[in-house]
Amino acid sequence: MTIAAARRYRNGSVIDHQLAPDAPPAGEGEFDWIGLVEPTEEEMDEVSARYHLHPLAVEDALGRRQMPKAESYAHQLFVVAKTAAFADDDRIVYGQTAIFMGADFIVSVRQGNDQGHHALRQEMESLPDRLAEGPDIVLHGLLDFIVDNYSPLLDRLEQIVDEMEDAAVASFPRPDSIRRIFRLRREMRRFEEIAGRTEEVAGKLSQVPLPCIDEHARPYFRDIYDHAKRAESRARWLTDTLGNIVDIAGLLEQSRQGDISRQLAGWAAILAVPTAIAGIYGMNFENMPELQTRYGYFVVLGVMASICTGLYIRFRRMGWL
């Protein structure tokens, strides 16, 4: 069987480091913590028979496309959470952790993710007083571990979005950059939905009476609710920012094009003066004023230079040049 760990605890201390499949049921003050990694249907059937898991919950645990949720089945609780990690190709890779919890057991089933719970288990075993409170504290630890891992993902995405903003201010995004923006925005929308569903699950665990959740454990789940809500808010902000980058870049590009157009118009107006005067005197008529004037050539050049200089000063003051 694909078992990452199978241990039995009594009053917060380990009494069996490798729980056997034929071990007797947990006694007073005891509970089992079983960790499974991508089990087969036959392996899940064995665990289901041992702990009397609901078949609908078992079916959901074997799938990989469930959204975060919390459901009660008689005296048991079934919770689905989604892990998330950022891949090199700008995709968010999701995994699923399904958790079955009863009065004397908790079973976690990981699908499609490599975020093991070994470090979490060691940390909780180092606090026997807390672990002695029961499986609901382990449930909190698992959900808190999953939600806390959203932060590195969001930190990386914030860094990417900041770089995109800076690049968009400098110049209009290239087509490949625009495609990347919309690809990331699509990924963020999905993550925002998952974070929102996780927030709903944590809120339900902290407020709604559910099997195997004691009153003293509810504040812990409210803490997860706050973390999930913060993750959703950050994801929504990143989604909106990605959507605004192209709009802002378009406005900046229009402004840059307007500056260029004004510069071209200013220089065209300046060059139009000597062009017009030279064009008039280049028509080769015999009877034209100033043709026989000794210094007429220099006078015309002076007039051109004076008008062009005046226009240049005027356009500079207007901010066109």
Image (cartoon, grey):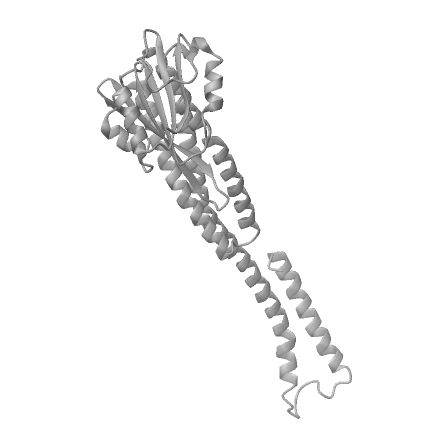
In the rendered image, the quadrant that contains the N terminus is top left
The residue that appears at 74% across and 81% down in the rendered structure is 297
Quick one: which residue is furthest to the bottom in this view? 286
In the picture provided, is 288 more to the left or to the right than 122? right
The answer to whether residue 69 of the structure is visible from this angle is: no
Q: Nearer the viewer, residue 233 or 96?
A: 96
Residue 60 versus residue 14 in the image, above or below: below
The residue that appears at 63% across and 88% down in the rendered structure is 283
Q: Position of residue 56 (x, y in %)?
A: 23, 30
Q: Nearer the viewer, residue 218 or 232?
A: 218
In the rendered image, the quadrant that contains the C terminus is bottom right
Q: Position of residue 194 (x, y in %)?
A: 36, 35
The residue that appears at 28% across and 28% down in the rendered structure is 45
Q: Nearer the viewer, residue 155 or 44?
A: 44
**Which quadrant holds residue 14?**
top left
The answer to whether residue 9 of the structure is visible from this angle is: yes
In the picture provided, is 155 more to the left or to the right than 30? right
**Which quadrant holds residue 107?**
top left
Residue 251 versus residue 116 in the image, above or below: below
Residue 148 versus residue 215 in the image, above or below: below
Query: What is the tally of numbered marks visible in this picture?
Result: 0
Quick one: which residue is furthest to the right in this view? 294
Quick one: which residue is furthest to the left in this view? 74
Q: Position of residue 203 (x, y in %)?
A: 33, 23
Q: Position of residue 181 (x, y in %)?
A: 46, 48
